[in-house]
Amino acid sequence: LQATMFHCSARCCEDRAASMQQVQRCIERCHAPLAQAQAIVTGELERFQDRLSRCTLHCSDKAKDALEAGGGETRARSQLDACVAACGDEHLHLVPSMAKRMRDGLATLQH
């Protein structure tokens, strides 16, 4: 995508009959697919990170509740560690579907 964008932008600059505004609009059109690709990838990664953060926050809340209930710091820490590890395992299973959504989204930009 980057190579295509740079080639496209270079062609815009080679048009000697175009005004500065026309060249600038042409270059902006060339950059649009790359910006869309970045938005697709960034969006998926942000959603993944948000989900993982919510899961670990839930673990933290459970550990605080256990600590306040008198479960002991060692037990609360152990519970927190196990819960966070489970979050990681659970979210690892989401990576293939996230990667597929990214590939599918990127494929639509190349057509």
Image (spheres, rainbow, N blue to C red):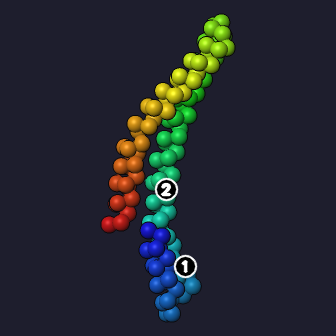
Residue 75 vertical position relative to residue 14 in the rendered view, above or below: above
Q: Quadrant of the N terminus?
A: bottom left
Q: CA distance from mark 1 to mark 2?
A: 22 Å
Q: Which residue is mark 1?
A: 24
Q: Amino acid at mark 2?
A: Ala
**Residue occupying image coordinates x 36% and y 66%:** 110
Look at the picture and state if 109 lies above or below 4.
above
Front: mark 1 or 2: 2
> Residue 66 at x, y = what percent?
61, 12
Q: Which label number is shown at residue 39?
A: 2
* Residue under the image location 52 percent in, 45 percent down: 46
Residue, far bottom: 16
Measured as percent of width and height from the top left, residue 56 is found at: 56, 29
- Residue 78, quarter of the rendered image: top right
Mark count: 2
Please state which amino acid type lies under the numbered disc 1.
Gln
Q: Is residue 43 above or below residue 80?
A: below
* Furthest residue toward top: 70
Quadrant of the image occupied by residue 68: top right
Q: Secondary structure at mark 2?
A: helix
Is residue 30 among the parts visible in the rendering? no
Residue at 41 percent of width and 38 percent of height:
94
- Residue 42, disc: none
Query: Residue 61: x, y in percent?
Result: 60, 20
Image position of 66 (left or right of 35) = right
Decide: few, some or many residues near mark 1? Use Cα within 10 Å; few <14, some 14-19, many ≥20. Answer: some
As drawn, 29 above or below 87: below
Identify the residue shown where x is 49% and y is 93%.
17
Q: Residue 12 placed where, x, y %?
A: 48, 83
The residue most toward the left is 111
Tag 1, which secondary structure?
helix
State the residue in front, 89 or 56: 89
